[in-house]
Image (spheres, rainbow, N blue to C red):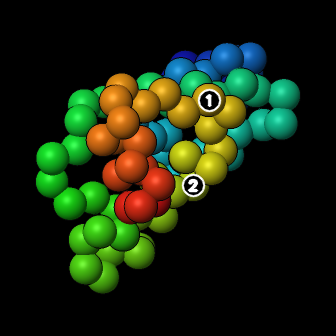
Amino acid sequence: DDYLSVLTTAKYIINNSTFPAYFTKKPEQVYVNTWHGTPIKAMGLDVEDNLVGSQNIIKNFLSADILVSPNPHTTEVFKRAF
């Protein structure tokens, strides 16, 4: 209950992965996604028939006001796979 309360009322929300699929960022919130790690495996739409499995990540990336990429390789994977 505390987590959901803070998640829905905080001005700034920061994550290094994704928020649950049921969460929708409010317009007044600022969402910073600092994604974890460097992808060395297939991810997102690079995985055959993975549209359903990628939907929450895509939703989170599109909801983020700031998406931090740790390096150029990861940036290219994000652009291609999500």
- Closer to the camera: disc 1 or disc 2? 1
4 lies left or right of 74: right
**Residue found at the far left of this picture:** 41
The residue sitting at 78% across, 37% down in the picture is: 26
Q: Is residue 53 visible?
A: no
Mark 1 vs mark 2: which is more N-terminal?
2
**Residue found at the far bottom of this picture:** 49
* Residue 80 locus on image (x, y percent): 41, 61
Residue on which disc 1 sits: 66
The residue sitting at 54% across, 33% down in the picture is: 67
Question: Which sits in the foreground, 73 or 24?
Answer: 73
**Residue found at the far right of this picture:** 28
Residue on which disc 2 sits: 59
User: Mark 1: few, some, or many residues within 10 Å (few <14, many ≥20)?
Assistant: some
The residue sitting at 22% across, 44% down in the picture is: 39
Q: Is residue 74 visible?
A: yes
Q: Gap between marks 1 and 2, in whole Å?
A: 14 Å
